Image (spheres, helix red, strand yellow):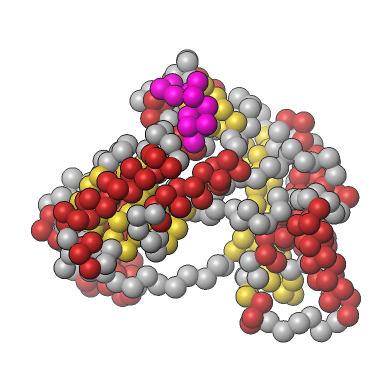
Amino acid sequence: MGINYLFLDMNSYFASVEQQLRPELRGKPVAVVPMLAETTCCIAASYEAKRFGVKTGTLVHDARLLCPRLEIVEARPKEYIRIHHQILQAVDSVLPIEAVLSIDEMVCRLMGREKVPTEALRLGEQVKQAIYRQVGLQMRCSVGLGPNRFLAKIAAEMHKPDGLTLLQLSDLPHRVYPLTLRDLPGIGPSMEQRLLQHGVTTVEQFYQLSLLQLAQVWGSRVHGFAWWHRLRGTDLPEAPTRRRSLSHSHVLPPVFRSETGARSVLSRLVHRAAARLRHEGYWTGSVALFVRFLDNSQKRKWDARIRIQPSQDTLTLLRTTLRLWQQKPEGTPFKVGVALGSLTPSSELSWPLFDQDQKLVHLARAMDKANRKYGPQAVYFAGMHRTEQSAVTRIAFNRIPDLDLPDI
């Protein structure tokens, strides 16, 4: 069995883009934030900043204490998306991309002689050089090569930044033993806690579990089987995925931390979520609202959820969300969000039965068409008026916004 996959992980992606586009930031500690406010947190940090202990999730105030010379930069999501597509083109000039996993991760499948370790390493170096030439020298990446996606990703994580690591079957299991449980893709805090409850504290102990024991830990024979084989380099087919929910949230700038301001931002989030729902071809069967309040002692959370008839028009979703809003407790809103769940593809649903519901869908699609043609805010409901800068595009690492979808 040869090297089947090349996994590419861009290093400190948002911060690296800023250093590439702004030469004055190169070599300096940089933190990227969603807005220029001391109450927010860092969403990315350059490696120069990471040496001081600044990382994703560090509060701006704490980051300044850790690194007094830290450069605070407001995020520019559209630039990150633009550079992302340039990186795709650079990689594709060397190898076809099998899957884009996030804005800063992608994977290529190797074929024929490409699977020979020496050839795979050569291709890994070619990919890195293509990114440097076509995108910029600040765009460092770590490349992992392995017999399956799982081990290729582990290899990419082993040497950062700017690494090129080969993980072969002959390297197993001793090369993975020094890792922590959380270093394994797919093991987060809750899964780690479950492993600890079964007496598993190291990767070596985890590796030595039998198929039956792994099934007991996961509560699933299927998942236990998959983990046992992937740890040993088996190239299992990737399970098909289906979207279950779609959400948008936003930390409110100080000027919008009021009843009226927060409701206006929430309306904008609903507009965006509804447009994205239609763009991706889904209908939603539930709406959830969540609010975080800014109290003197702590940030208090509240959420509510309601099931609805399958819908995708903006007005219905807006009315539903605002009904939930009326149920929220008193307090100063700090963050608002909406989640559309129980998603069903359009191909699995029949057209609405009642004429009024059909008109609402036609209205929503007409708004989408106008916004695509005349600009992202050409047509919108009055509730989101004057919120243009309050809820700008944000990028989740596991989703790349579609440039063809208006940012309303």
Q: Residue at x 59, y 53 (%)?
A: 401
Q: Which residues are magenta?
A: 17-29
- Residue 35 is left or right of residue 389, and the answer is left
Magenta stretch: residue 23 in it?
yes
The residue nearer to you, when weighing 205 against 341, is 341
Q: Residue farthest to the top? A: 68
Q: Residue at x 61, y 25 (%)?
A: 38
Image coordinates of residue 147 in percent, x first then y, are 22, 62
Q: Residue at x 39, y 44 (%)?
A: 131
The residue nearer to you, when weighing 140 against 309, is 140
Of the 4 image quadrants, the one containing the N terminus is: bottom left
Image coordinates of residue 380 in percent, x first then y, are 84, 53
Q: Is residue 95 visible?
A: yes
Placement of 69 over or under 148, stated as above or below = above
Picture quadrant where residue 190 is located: bottom left
Give the main secondary structure, helix, strand or loop, of the magenta stretch.
helix
Q: Residue at x 63, y 82 (%)?
A: 348
Picture quadrant where residue 39 is located: top right
